[in-house]
Image (spheres, rainbow, N blue to C red):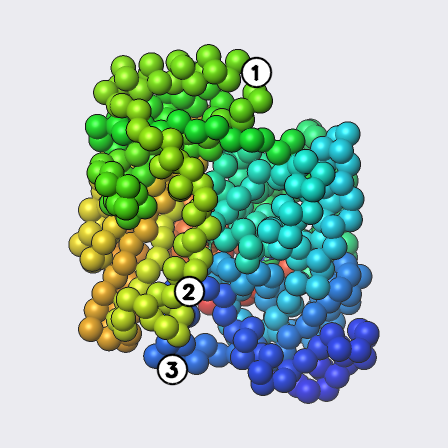
Amino acid sequence: MDPHALDALAERLPRGRVTDHHGEVATHARDRWALALLREARGARVPPPAAVVFPQTTEEVAVVLRWACDAGATIVPRAGASGLAGGAEAIKRSVVLDLHRLNRILDLDDLSQTVTVEAGVKGGDLERSIAAKGFTTGHDPESLEISTVGGWVATSSQGAASAGFGGASDLVLGLTAVLPGGEVLRLKPSPRPDTGPDLRRLLAGSEGTLAVITELTLAVSRAPALVWDAFRPHSFESGAALVREAVQCGFHPLVVNLLDDQEAGRMFGAFGHQGPVTLFGFDAAAPAIEARRFELRQLSRDLGGRPVDRELAEHWWDHRHDGVQWYEDVMGPDRALGRGVVADGMGVACLWRRLPLVYEQVRGALFDHAESVGCHLAHPYPTGASLHFSFVLRASTDGEVEDVYRDAWADATAACLDSGGSPAHHGVGLLKAPFMAEELGATGVDILRRVKAAFDPQWLLNPGKLVPRPDGL
Ligand SMILES: Cc1cc2nc3c(=O)[nH]c(=O)nc-3n(C[C@H](O)[C@H](O)[C@H](O)COP(=O)(O)OP(=O)(O)OC[C@H]3O[C@@H](n4cnc5c(N)ncnc54)[C@H](O)[C@@H]3O)c2cc1C
């Protein structure tokens, strides 16, 4: 990057917004993608960005994107950097746009039940602030404390209570975003915009490749007090059948989680529990709640399950964010499981009819490479569900395990697509970009590229992610 170009940017912004200090660029090179952490662990530095910019307002983001257009500079938006797919990796010596100073909670409308926030607000901060007024977004990813509201929407994040509240993109009512070139798009909050294709939905899941989201209005709900039911199904498949019936028959649980043998063993071993577990969390104040829970117990019995201690559900709920520290311990400098180890997760969405096959095939493909594989179903929909596979790979060195990692992802993704599933969760980033053609078909990828070119004719925003340029530049 021409230092004069950076000076020109610094001149257009208030003092202290632009830096190319080596410490700052080094800590903005990557997100939490396992492969980047692995490379760092073996001393192969992830190439740093040319500079980091810390905008504080939508207008400052617009200044940066206008400058990028003039200077031909590539820009990587980055917020909590909790992404697991390399979406915020600063490839191509880009300039990183660090959004964490866009951190104001602007308005809580308790009548309409909406909250308007800047995109860099951390999830935990938002939840604590609106909980004081009796509200929640209901969006509760494991990474709640380290991820941002803008990152949730940019990656179409899913949380532990998605059964009741949907995913992050379902909460979006309005947004402000800056387009490449600096133009500002403001879409006012609407409970149901029926004015052509919904541009809010177009930006949800676009992973910083089309625009930079600076402000969001999200739906909030009255914070529920949860009551729990827990069952031991006789197999993962019959647990999935119970979840399917509960969702399709209108039991309206807010939280659902079905843990297979391995995940339940890890989570509930200390309770002496064995076998899969299905957990349901309901709003204690919801109408006819006791009748619904009674019927659910009956349904579970009909499907061969039996009730187990609700303490299991409460234990799981209390520890639902613990995976962040565990991941840090395993993949960070401590390498808690030793060198040559990678821990990662893979999300897969499919229709109910396909679910047993997808579960078997993806699990089998991962087991060909992994020393352990667990699975849980936490995001049920009336027509299908998302499965989340957690796996640990081991080789003799941090170098060798990278090949194992690539093979595991390639084989498990092929198994997912062959059995009728779609890759889901945690974004596409660099990790899943190579699989997009198989998922969407050549025409689907071409359409995404045309959309990208319409928003960003110079391909300056988050290059290489989601759908890389056809010429690979
Ligand atoms: C241990 C662990 C557990 C996790 N658990 C979950 C989980 O339960 N559910 C889940 O969905 N995810 C989970 N994740 C993944 C991650 O937390 C989510 O993808 C999250 O939404 C990313 O938010 P972020 O603010 O950290 O975004 P970043 O990682 O900074 O960025 C992610 C992508 O979004 C883009 N982006 C970020 N902000 C903006 C913006 N304002 N405008 C435009 N583009 C933007 C970036 O360019 C990048 O492509 C987990 C991650 C870890 C490390």
The CA span between labels 1 and 2 is 41 Å
Q: Residue at x 50, y 42 (%)?
A: 159
What is the x, y in percent for residue 184?
77, 54
- Sequence-wise first label, 2 or 3: 3
Say if mark 2 contacts mark 3, CB within 8 Å: no
Where disc 1 sits, the SS reads loop
- Say what amino acid the circle numbered 3 marks: Gly
Where disc 2 sits, the SS reads helix
**Label 3: how many residues lie within 10 Å, few (<14), some (14-19) or many (20+)?**
few
- Relative to residue 80, is residue 409 drawn left or right? left
Q: Residue at x 66, y 36 (%)?
A: 135
Say if mark 3 contacts mark 1, CB within 8 Å: no
Front residue of 334/49: it is 334
Ligand 1 within 8 angstroms of badge 2 C-beta: yes
Which quadrant of the figure contains the N terminus?
bottom right
Tag of residue 328: 2
Tag of residue 287: 1
Front residue of 272/27: it is 272
What is the x, y in percent for residue 132?
69, 42
Instruction: Give the answer, above or below, for where 352 lies relative to 359.
Output: above
- Relative to residue 351, is residue 443 drawn left or right? right
- Sequence-wise first label, 1 or 2: 1
